[in-house]
Amino acid sequence: RTGKVDYYKGLSFDDYDMLSKQLPSTMERQEMYGVVRTLNGRMDKPELPFKDLRVRQALNMALNKQAILDSFYKGRGELLSWPWYSWKEHQKAYIPLKDLPVDVRDLFTYNPAKAKQLLAEAGSPNGFKTNIVTTQDQVDLLSIARQDLLKVGIDMEIKVLEYGVYNSVNRGRTQDQMIFKESKMFFIPWMMHEVRKESFDNLSFFEAPETRAAYNALQPYIGKDGNKVWQILKDVTPFMLQQAPMGGLMPVPYVYDMWWPWLKNFYDATSMSYWAPETNLKYSWIDQDLKRTMGH
């Protein structure tokens, strides 16, 4: 479980390719799992530029997301996976990129000229300097993003932290300016983690009346009317995307699960109930005879 991306589960595409060649008898399944990387700029500090919507939108237009998906992830991923993924569990709230309003689709289209225009309108015609904290394993990806941002005048210094220090900054929301982190919107969607200012997963400190109203509106239906909850989330999705709360959204890569044929009663279910990781293994067993016949 190593490679260009780190996840709670799943192999990167590099490891998947390697193991597929080395272990051709292995069973496998492709799966997209929930870590969308985001560039979060603090909105609670008036001296920083991220409170201005035009700056956040410029960040997105300056990132060549399609090129990152095609080259860094070798085309194995999706451009849009925030706030919800395209997997089955989110279908009642997920809106495909092609069906979203034009101003939202524009945020996923590489347009440095428009990004420069937005920065100028926001009072930064020459861009600005900032910094972003991350861990060593994300430097390659962030370096690509940095080069894109430099083209519109945004000089983003990458500060690498030891993982323990980074985790403390992440959970404490104590980054100086920006932080590169994994999205948590997919996790318990009705909690709307990244658009409520009090949530410690909202590292940009974003808050808006529209998202607060949606959060309040769905509370009476939790555990009672799931369809109503999903409809409220779907209705507010275009607004959340248009607001670009965390600043910069990156594409999400596919990751993979692989297992030997002798692992029985395992169907790639990695969590029992909503969040109980790895508990499924107590229901699986090893076919020792099959394992021996395969030379192991």
Image (tube, rainbow, N blue to C red):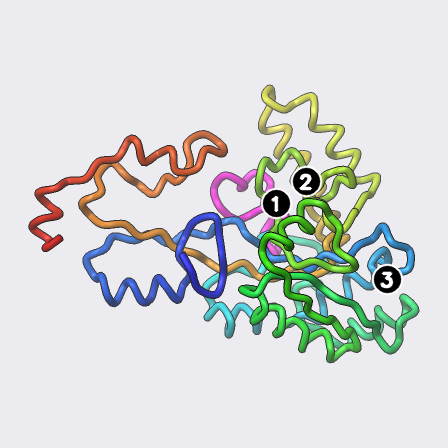
Q: Which mark is residue 49?
A: 3
In the rendered view, tell whether residue 74 sits above or below residue 53: below
Total number of numbered labels?
A: 3
Q: Which residues are magenta?
A: 83-99
Which of these two is toward me, 9 or 191? 9
| Residue 128, image quadrant | bottom right
Task: Assess disc 3: are there few (<14), some (14-19) or many (≥20) residues with their C-alpha within 10 Å of its C-alpha.
Answer: many
Residue 229 shows in this picture = yes
Query: Badge 2 is on which residue?
Result: 193
Query: Badge 1 is on which residue?
Result: 184
Going by the numbered disc 2, the residue's amino acid type is: His
Residue 105 shows in this picture = no
Name the side, left or right, on which 267 lies relative to 95. Answer: left
Task: Assess disc 2: are there few (<14), some (14-19) or many (≥20) residues with their C-alpha within 10 Å of its C-alpha.
Answer: many
Going by the numbered disc 1, the residue's amino acid type is: Lys
In the rendered view, tell whether residue 293 sits above or below residue 150: above
Closer to the chain start, of discs 3 and 2, is: 3
